[in-house]
Image: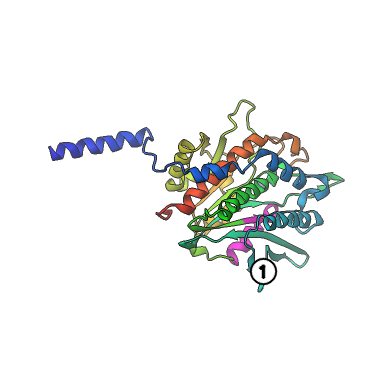
């Protein structure tokens, strides 16, 4: 009998696995509550400012990028997120140079965890873009004012939860990179001079271009999880989050080698598990037509909440993420 039970048990687990029924997570009412702080109206407010002509395309080292950095830091300060210590100063800026000419900065804030605070989850988005050319501004509404706005809202949700006594067990680091469009330079500098130890950084969730649809008939919950095929644990977790909290249409195909093309790649190169959230591609990519009015804000909201749920689970659960 015992053996037979074992056989049945194995068959059950096998079938369960095939049909993906073995959801290992449970909805956390606290996460559900604070996910509601992520709002499409606020996303639109941030994005409209970041992608306005007055920020001149946020080119790394130029006035527009500095204005964007100041805007982001002001928001982080309002949320009362912790600044970093950089060159013995409390600040939200990790300054760096590119060659002799260009001075720029990553913008970084964090929330200290509780009993597992020495483990760090990095959430990131680049905020720079292509600047202007012949009087035309590359506003980069999707690339990547969308990810930047989403990261601000996710940070706000975590900050509100922490303020009300719901800190996560692990620490969460929010990084807004500059220099991305010049060759992932902000993240390259960060992994070379990490503010938080890389060997204690257990994952990077990066968002870059999350506000557009590839096809008009797409579900707004459609999102590419680039890198998921290299990390079955993050892939499984994402599927479970989708089932538990809100249904997403998860895609894994990396048609355009995006794995190598945004800031998460520098973390992946250091052996840190990554996920890259991306909406696919449109013909407005790197064109002056990448503008605010084309952004689908309910989609940005849905993806931002999805990332929030994923980060929440990673930062609060008992077991550490396996590589
Ligand atoms: Zn980008």
Question: Under tag 1, what secondary structure?
Answer: strand
Quarter-of-image position of residue 26: top left
Q: Nearer the viewer, residue 317 or 295?
A: 317
In magenta stretch: residue 191:
yes
Q: Quadrant of the C terminus?
A: bottom left
Q: Is residue 133 left or right of residue 76?
A: right
Residue shown at 63%/32% (left/top)? 214
User: Is 132 above or below relative to 243?
Assistant: below
Q: Nearer the viewer, residue 24 or 26?
A: 26
Q: Give, as a single range, the part of the protein colored magenta.
A: 175-193
Q: Is residue 248 left or right of residue 103?
A: left
Residue shown at 41%/43% (left/top)? 25
| Residue that protrudes farthest toward the top in the picture | 217
In magenta stretch: residue 72:
no
Residue shown at 78%/41% (left/top)? 288
Residue 208 visible to the viewer = yes
Quarter-of-image position of residue 237: top left
Residue 256 visible to the viewer = no
In the picture of the structure, the residue carrying the numbered disc 1 is 90
């Amino acid at each position: 009998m015992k053996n037979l039970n074992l056989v049945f048990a194995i068959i059950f687990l096998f079938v369960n696995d095939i049909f993906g029924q073995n959801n290992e997570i449970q909805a956390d009412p606290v996460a559900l509550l604070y996910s509601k702080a992520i709002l499409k109206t606020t996303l639109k407010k941030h994005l409209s400012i970041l992608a306005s002509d007055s920020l001149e395309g946020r080119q790394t080292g130029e006035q527009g990028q500095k204005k964007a950095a100041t805007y982001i830091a002001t928001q982080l300060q309002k949320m009362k997120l912790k600044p970093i210590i950089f060159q013995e100063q409390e600040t939200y800026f990790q300054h760096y140079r590119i060659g002799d000419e260009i001075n720029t900065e990553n913008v970084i804030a964090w929330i200290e965890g509780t009993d597992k605070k020495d483990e760090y989850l990095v959430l990131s988005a680049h905020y720079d873009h292509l600047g202007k050319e012949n009087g035309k501004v590359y506003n980069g509404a999707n690339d990547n004012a969308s990810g930047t706005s989403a990261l601000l809202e996710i940070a706000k949700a975590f900050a509100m939860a922490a303020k009300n006594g719901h800190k996560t067990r692990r620490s969460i680091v929010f990084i807004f990179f500059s220099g991305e469009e010049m060759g992932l330079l902000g993240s390259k500098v960060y992994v070379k001079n990490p503010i938080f130890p890389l060997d204690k950084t257990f994952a990077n969730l990066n968002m870059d271009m999350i506000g557009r649809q590839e096809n008009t008939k797409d579900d707004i919950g459609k999102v590419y999880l680039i890198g998921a095929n290299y990390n079955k644990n993050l892939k499984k977790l994402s599927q479970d989050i989708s089932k538990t909290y809100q249904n997403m249409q998860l895609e894994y195909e990396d048609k355009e080698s995006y794995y190598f093309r945004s800031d998460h790649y520098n973390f992946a190169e250091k052996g840190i598990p990554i996920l890259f959230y991306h909406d696919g591609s449109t013909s407005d990519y790197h064109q002056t037509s990448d503008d605010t009015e084309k952004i689908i804000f309910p989609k940005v909201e849905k993806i931002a909440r999805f990332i929030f749920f994923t980060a929440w689970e990673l930062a609060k659960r008992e077991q550490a993420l396996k590589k």
